[in-house]
Image: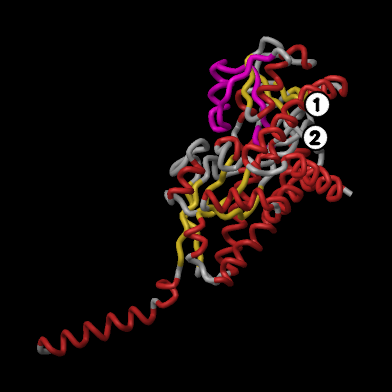
Amino acid sequence: MDRANVFKGAVLGLAAVWLGAGTAVAQTVMRFADYGPNRGTRAETVQWLFSEIEARTEGRVTIDQHWGGALLGAKNGFDGLKSGVADIVTVTAVYAPQDLFAYRVGDLPITSENEVAQTMALYELATTNEAMQEQFDRAGVVYLANYTVGPIQMVCNGADIRSFDDLKGKKVRYTAEYGKIFEDMGVTTISLPTPEIYQALSTGLVDCAQTYAYTTLSYKLIEVADQFLVFDLGTLGSNGIFMNRRSFERLDQADRETVLAAGREMTERNAQAVRDANQEAIAAFPQGIDGKSLTVVEISDEDRARIEEASQPYIDAWIAESADFGFDGQAVVDAYKTLISSKSE
């Protein structure tokens, strides 16, 4: 075969590859970052979300997943999202307090014993509230979904806590406003992201850690603890999955709508799964899981009432500070409580 025919054959071959790879050329690969492990209830529902996105877009959108802080950690996740290090990121709002101030209404110490109602109330606010939308737009992100952790509980190692007063002088890991509330009530608090709780409990850096039943299992905290305290307080609800706006706008309109619809479904699916997982874990702790058991202690109604009373000043402070961000915080809190109540019925 002479050179001209060789060249012609190569060109035709490349053309066939190009035409045959039409689907691949049209594919958009989104890089996802999560600070948590690829296991447990939350991880399962997040992977369900991505599987649904890939299936519903017929492979036009695929997700390259990076778990366990391999790409972005809890504290730098939102900055990494804004700068485009990742296209989709699990975000805990407490680590982006200015950018997500309005969204942090979900972290206020507002008691809600129903994870599903609380989660869907916050989802509705995040997708309709003008103040939240403006902050998302300013940061260059798109809200996709919310995941709940359930009512705040506590896990301890060697502390033998029977009432809230037993926590006074103990070292307790916290996040968000509950740390300040506990400090006001005489507890020594230490701020740590969730992935660091295991080592902190095992080394004695902390005696107890604010956490949840299902994370006690997914982060294997049962291995380094001997007691689980049922507080059933409010929840840290402002945990979301966000997409970089530039990445979102690369998708065609139909795929954008698909991603958003799947995000809402994941939000409700996750909330119900977490509610079930939390209740099942608490019931199983005394009997033991994988050979390790926890003593379960329920905080009294009197102790819970004391904590709720100590919480109100922090709700009032957030409302007052909202004026600095140009919106009516009282109206947002009222709307949030109303939605929780209506969705609990």
Q: Position of residue 144 (x, y in %)?
A: 61, 55
- Residue 308's tag is 1
Amino acid type of the residue tagged 2 in the rendering: Thr
Tell me the element at label 1. helix
Q: Residue at x 48, y 48 (%)?
A: 81
Query: Which of marks 1 and 2 precedes in the sequence?
Result: 2
User: Distance from label 2 to label 1 (Cα)?
Assistant: 8 Å
Q: Position of residue 97 (x, y in %)?
A: 58, 36
Q: Residue at x 77, y 24 (%)?
A: 296
The residue stretch that appears in magenta: 187-216
The image shows residue 143, relative to residue 93, as above or below, that is below
Amino acid type of the residue tagged 1 in the rendering: Glu
Question: In the rendered view, how is the structure colored?
Answer: secondary structure
Residue density around tag 2, few if under 14, some if 14–19, many if 20 or more, within 10 Å: some
Whether residue 151 sits left or right of residue 208 in the image: it is right
Q: In front here: 258 or 247? A: 247
**Circles 2, 1 touching at the beta carbon (< 8 Å):** yes
Q: Position of residue 75 (x, y in %)?
A: 51, 35
Residue 168 visible in rendering: yes
Residue hosting label 2: 111
- Report the number of numbered marks: 2
Question: Which corner quadrant holds the N terminus?
Answer: bottom left
The image shows residue 335, relative to residue 169, as above or below, that is below
Tell me the element at label 2. loop
